[in-house]
Amino acid sequence: MKFDTRVYVAGHRGLAGSALVRGLAARGYSNIVTRTHAEVDLLDAAAVARLFAEEKPEVVLLAAAKVGGILANNTYPAEFVRDNLVIQSTVIHEAFRAGVTRLLFLGSSCIYPRDCPQPIREDYLLTGPLEPTNRPYAIAKIAGIEMCWSYNRQYGTRYLCVMPTNLYGLGDNYDLTTSHVLPALIRKFHEAKVRGDATVTLWGTGAPRREFLYSDDMASACLHLLELPDDRLSTLVNNRAPPLVNVGSGEDLTIRDLADLVREIVGTRATVTWDSSKPDGTPRKLLDVSHLNALGWRPSIALGDGIRRAYANYLSLAGG
Ligand SMILES: NC(=O)c1ccc[n+]([C@@H]2O[C@H](COP(=O)([O-])OP(=O)(O)OC[C@H]3O[C@@H](n4cnc5c(N)ncnc54)[C@H](OP(=O)(O)O)[C@@H]3O)[C@@H](O)[C@H]2O)c1
């Protein structure tokens, strides 16, 4: 990629997309194309076609999606499958029609079978049943991977699918009805501190193990992959296997330990009550990142540092 390559970031206001824009700018890319949801609804194929015709992007980073935690996935399964299928197939197809040869499709670690061995290797895809709580979302994402792979096979494109682990960072979603676990913990402990509550109630048992990656680290991994020379990219994008790369920190911890860490950083003495009537989700989700590491990338922001940055950002967003 050259510094004046036209790069379209779809979903640039989201957690992942905004980190990609920051990462591109920090690396010196000056020709970044963006559209807000209000300007271009990615469910509208004609609007997406117009965008590609007007802007002629050369590289596409697809970080727009309908995203949410267990509650949102359980409540809106129809939107989670439909919106994601439509957004990704529209953007990928219009990118192909516009002659884009490099595209990065962001998926998620929930594409892997619920009970697959840990850490999760890329070749565990489609080897067992999915976690039911986010199956509609996961199946849409799996269709996106199949689409990228098929276009690569049939049309010789180089569309790469990255599967980030749980992300957190600047501009995260702190709405408790749709947020992921880490921003939800930040908000709950912060509000308990402000109100002086003695206890905080959290969903599940605290036993599941999860891996987390700061969003700017995820962006740095994605851009590292995008900037790989053609011969190295070709080892990822070939006809034999899905063009899939896990993006994670390679380390996990229990939700209970995560809650202790967030509580300490937020600075409250509130104790935790675990509401075990609520679902835990997958017991463990740790990505095998040996592939990414072998390509020369490692994370640089430790979990505690990342949570401190995210909490400072939450305070500025909340005006506190
Ligand atoms: N967050 C995580 O922990 C995580 C982990 C692994 C992978 N990922 C992947 O990263 C990608 C982005 O996730 P995220 O966490 O950054 O989500 P996010 O913060 O909710 O951002 C998604 C973005 O997509 C936009 N969008 C959604 N529907 C749209 C539509 N119909 N038309 C135009 N724009 C639309 C949203 O705009 P509006 O807000 O205006 O609708 C938002 O800017 C997803 O593919 C997700 O699977 C995320």
Image (spheres, helix red, strand yellow):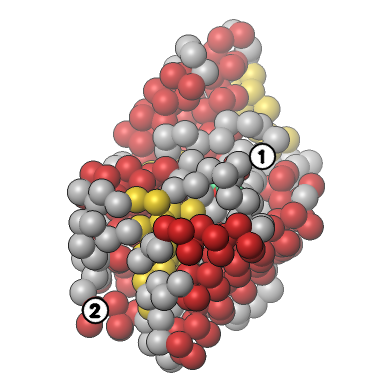
Which mark, by number, is residue 230?
A: 2
Mark 2 secondary-structure assignment: helix
Residue under circle 1?
178
Q: Answer left or right for 115 relative to 18.
A: right
Residue 154 horizontal/vertical position (percent): 49, 90
Residue neighbourhood size for the residue with mark 2, other residues' Cα within 10 Å, grouped as few (<14), some (14–19), many (≥20): few
> On the image, which quarter does residue 297 sit in?
bottom left
Q: Answer left or right for 42 relative to 309.
A: right
Which mark, by number, is residue 151?
A: none
Residue at 49 percent across and 54 percent down: it is 10
Is residue 29 something that shows in the picture?
yes
Position of residue 315 relative to residue 180, above or below, is: above
Q: Looking at the image, tell me whether mark 1 or mark 2 is earlier in sequence order.
A: 1
Q: Nearer the viewer, mark 1 or mark 2?
A: 2
Position of residue 27 relative to residue 51, above or below, is: above
Mark 1 secondary-structure assignment: loop
> On the image, which quarter does residue 189 sit in?
top right
In this view, the residue in front, 304 or 137, is: 137
Q: Is mark 2 within 8 Å of ligand 1?
A: no
